[in-house]
Amino acid sequence: MKLAELERYFASAATSGSGPLPDLERIFVGSDQLSAKDRLAIYNRGYFYRLLDALASVFGQTKRLLGDADFERLGLAYVAQYPSEHPAVERIGRAFPAYLRGVHAPATIVDVASLEWARLCALVAANPRSVATVHAIEPGLFPQARLRFVPSLHWLELDPRALSAFAGEAPARAAQATADPPGPLLGVAVWRNQHAVRHEALDASEWTALVCAAGGGTLSEVCSAFASESAADDVHRAFQVLSNWFAKQWLEQIEYGEARRISD
Amino acid sequence: MHRAADPQQALNALPSARSASAVACVGFGLRVPHYDAILSHGLRSDFAEAISENFLGRGGRAFSVLERVRSDMPVALHGVSLSIGGMEPLANTYLEELSELARRISAFSVSDHLCFGTFGGHYAHDLWPLPYTEEALVHVAERVQKVQDRLGRRLLLENVSSYVAYRASTLTEWEFLSEVVTRADAGILLDLNNVFVSANNHGFSALSYLRALPRERVRQIHLAGHSDAGGYLFDDHGSAVSDAVWQLYEQSLELFGALPTIVEWDERLPELSVLEAEAAHARALSNARLTARHEAEP
């Protein structure tokens, strides 16, 4: 057999969800002490459980909520269906929340998994090239400016119960909660500050503003998210939210168009 | 213990080849559970080893740890996902990021494993053994040369532990390893625990393996623990270095001299102090060898 065939055969044996392939003795050397089949089983077991361990290291709260047995069952089925596509092993979980949704896991647990994945992405994100401060604001150009966020900032909409479940609510209570019909979704921001990953629920107007800004909206468009019946309140709220974004170091750069870029 | 305040001075002090060094250089691998301790107190070591994939393209705590360690001592980059024997094309993005990281930290060395670990565009995250054939030899040597061209430096290849062998193999593992590094002008990162585990699992002599290697190509040593799985030895990096592997280390010191040595520990990771004690033992053995050699010189 050629090298390519041998490697293909080995990979099939090592990654087969139903255990090593038959007829292995023809390809591999066994011994009285340990047959070729038993030897390949070491790799087969190692493949699945290494990836399951990697999944558990990222989805710790999801595992707690599902329980060890269900997490193992679903995790092994998942890694069989979604092999790793990244050199770093913890990225194996890229599609795990969607997979859980596909197998009709409780919505709250799916959202806890989504939150945990976002937290991993924030944890390993590259450092920002800069962190913008309020000094980067040019008042005359401000309405047309656009915001560039730091690489670690992620945003997602979740079942509000997912936040309390993530925070360690007792499994029995969480299970009861997941049986209730879901309420309106809550916008959540996830980011890394220094070495710590944080997440925070946003109110509806801040969520709208964040999505607008992340989508390339100008600051005047972003501020329109705070429009209400009171102009004074709107200005105050917009100022408060944008100040917080600076304070939380969400902003990498304020962009003033092609001709001029100012960063701090 | 050797610790230089200037990282470049420390880098220069490390033996880059088999040449006799005046001081033993022993360290251990950076692992996530130790990050907080490292950030708080630094690392007591001669040099350190970082798993490349844990730092590629990353910021945050991981990179702060790497920068902190690098400010004190040289760092060797050790990869697990290159898949040098795989049939998939070499991953361009991976090599670009690895090259950038090696340049950024002035990596003491860059190494990966003599194995394959990719299939159908996917990563196994395991170190699968190769068939030791002429075809595989040509394939791997060519890829090592390509990687070295991309990195602009010599690659060190580590022998892996294995549990199975191919009937198609026409060479022994040590013949294959020796020939690959010679044809590709690469170096050997000799994992003594892996040699011991594979020797037990396949029934060959670990010492004969060591004696058959081209001495001038052996550049670094790995030490680690293994477990007895009943019927075979399992390379789990989950315990202290065994007495048998320490003996093999002493024999390697006779054969290759005192080389930069890393103690690895991954499963059931103990506190840093335990790793420091393992490293101290390796340092003592290495220094004893250096002293004996010095006294034997006319």
Image (spheres, rainbow, N blue to C red):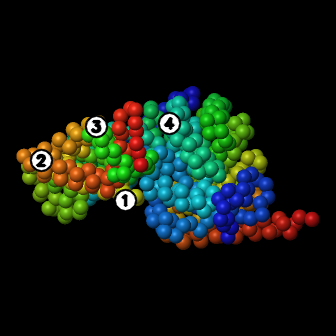
Horizontal placement of B251 versus B62: left or right? Answer: right
Taking A116 as reference, is A28 above or below it? Answer: above
Amino acid type at circle 3 is: Gln
Residue B68: quadrant of the picture: bottom right
Q: CA distance from mark 2 to mark 1?
A: 37 Å
Task: Residue under label 3, please give it.
Answer: A144
Task: Residue under label 1, please give it.
Answer: A196
Amino acid type at circle 1 is: Ala
Task: Residue under label 4, please give it.
Answer: B93
Q: CA distance from mark 4 to mark 2?
A: 50 Å
Task: Residue under label 2, please give it.
Answer: A231
Q: Nearer the viewer, mark 1 or mark 3?
A: 3
- Residue at image point 56% right, 66% down: B43
On the same chain, marks 4 and 2? The answer is: no
Chain for numbered disc 3 = A
Q: Are marks 4 and 2 in contact (CB under 8 Å)?
A: no
